[in-house]
Image (cartoon, grey):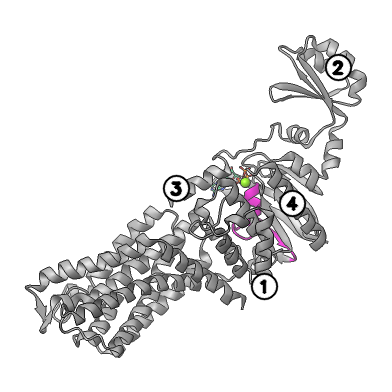
Amino acid sequence: MNIIEIKNLTKKFEKMTAVDNLNLEIKEGEIFGLLGPNGAGKTTTLLMLVTLKPPTSGTATINGFDIVKQPDKVRKSIGIVFQDPSSDEILTGYENLKLHGWLYDMPDELREDRIKEVLKLVDLTDRKNDRVKKYSGGMRRRLELARGLMHHPKILFLDEPTLGLDPQSRDHIWKYIENLAKEKNMTIIITTHYMDEADKLCDRLAIIDKGKIVVLGSPKQLKNDLGGDIIRLKAQTLDLDALKKLPYVKEINPCDGEVCLTLENANIHLQEILQTVGTIDSVEIRSPTLDDVFLHYTGRAIREDTPEGSWAEKAMNASEKK
Amino acid sequence: MSEIKGIYALWYRETKVFLRERSRVISSIINPLLWLLIIGGGLGSAVSFSGINYQTFIYPGILIQTALFSSVFFGVYIVWDKKIDFMKEVLVAPMRRTSIFIGKILGGSTDTLLQVLILFVIGIIFMIGGIMPGLKLTPFSVLVSLAFLLVTTVGLVSIGLILGSQMESPEGFQLIISFLIFPLFFLSGALFPITNLPGWLAPLILANPVTYAVDGIRGVMMGISRFNLLFDFTLVCLFALVMVLIGTYAFKKMKL
Ligand SMILES: Nc1ncnc2c1ncn2[C@@H]1O[C@H](COP(=O)(O)OP(=O)(O)OP(=O)(O)O)[C@@H](O)[C@H]1O
Ligand SMILES: [Mg+2]
């Protein structure tokens, strides 16, 4: 069953089209990833799906309800962790969570149990009675996550949930989310810039660029589709023209100031390639990762910070203003 | 049920935040005190109306002033909520927009009425201390005044929320409300009697809903009024009702 069906969803801001005629179906219980460079339209898509921004045209159904015509019903089935901070800084962490429980009409006992559970998950139990104003950027982010995970909605949207978190916190949180998806058959839609995370976690993912889906599939399938292996070469000068003449080299991409080749059976051809390019500093053969998939389809490597600055910076700016 | 819990949540948040921001509480007391002592005291040495000393005379006006400034200004917090994205958390919750509006009204009204209550205490102290002769703060007059203040506050908070829901910058909001608050205050009879107004001024004052709140409260506190108490109260209620209706609509149309 498709729990989310997106039909021709479009959002225009003045002249620019942030989301361009998007069509997508997501199955119940799936962990679905939306990947894309900065400004690709991921956040805009999520905000439309959670009924906070009206689409310019097109629509979507969530849990059978139309996001344009039945927003109240849609909101009863969803939860979201926003990309930007949205807690009240004058309240304590615990008070923010309690408020969330009330807003979502959780029974008192369940609410208190869950608050304990999520506070432990994000390691904020000791700081729960501090005002959010006194939290660090990462702590705010964790509180935000705890809050989104509290009420166990049928469908959970996570907009770059682990941005700026240390690896250990990320691990904990992903385990918890995977568990939720499995045990409660919860559907989870995430956007992330961490490719390894998307690879491990997502059942399927879509790479979007300039508001359009460029490719869609399971991480495994996407990597296989690239075909073969990646050879990464580092050298002062490379004879690219000669490389282009080799028939079995499918693709040549710059990556991080080095050059990446895509080809089948790299181990057989390595000898010839090395002879062709001349002196090199180092070489590496590996299977494709999602980073390569991303690079292949968008022509860009993914960056972890947003153009406006990191999440934590934004949180700090907002707090200074207040 | 879910709506009531949500409304309670919003009220709880506004009240907590208000009580934690001490500067807001303190300035809300200092300002009216200055008016009472300096304007009231200064002019009071020379001016009195119907045998009532000027300081006493403007006391109802200062009560309304506090309610007016604090209520309308409350709308700025919704602009802030949009900025810090707290608004998103609220708007995405399974609550009706109307309930969100009600929660905000209750929060704003509580803030305002707490400030007004402090002014009542000051009034009683001044009355007992003989500073404001002619002021009759009896249980009846206090209750009726509170009823007036409550209803007026609901209407005024709605004005603030309506403006706040449509605006994006706190600075813009502040600019607009100062154009609104000052006429509402000066044209309400808070500072002068409205019985013998010059012809050009009368319509402005009679069109101002705040006038009727001042008139009602002054009537019950010191026996000076132009209109019948029930008439005053009806108009104030009508004003609040219209503002609440417009506010409900504005919240339904609110964009982020
Ligand atoms: N309120 C707005 N007004 C005008 N343009 C907007 C607005 N919100 C987003 N945009 C534009 O829409 C495009 C998509 O933005 P969006 O936030 O959806 O990107 P994203 O994929 O989430 O990027 P990021 O990885 O940086 O979070 C961007 O070009 C952005 O500038
Ligand atoms: Mg985004």
Label 4, on which residue?
Answer: A23
Tell me, yes or no, whether the two marked residues, 3 and 1, touch with CB atoms within 8 Å. no
The percent position of residue B90, horizontal first and vertical second, equals 56, 63
Is residue B202 in sight in this rendering?
yes
Give the mark nearest the N terminus, 3 or 4. Answer: 4
The amino acid on which the numbered mark 1 sits, given as a three-letter code, is: Glu
Query: Does residue A290 lie above or below B104 as drawn?
Result: above
Q: Are marks 1 and 2 on the same chain?
A: yes
Nearer to us of marks 1 and 4 is: 1
Q: CA distance from mark 3 to mark 4?
A: 40 Å
Quarter holding the N terminus of chain B? bottom right
Nearer to us of marks 3 and 2 is: 3
Query: Does residue A177 lie above or below B198 as drawn?
Result: above
| Chain letter of the residue beneath label 1 in the structure image | A
Give the mark nearest the N terminus, 1 or 4. Answer: 4
Query: Does residue B96 lie above or below A119 as drawn?
Result: below
Give the mark nearest the N terminus, 3 or 2. Answer: 2
Label 2, on which residue?
Answer: A246
Label 3, on which residue?
Answer: A320
Under circle 4, the secondary element is strand
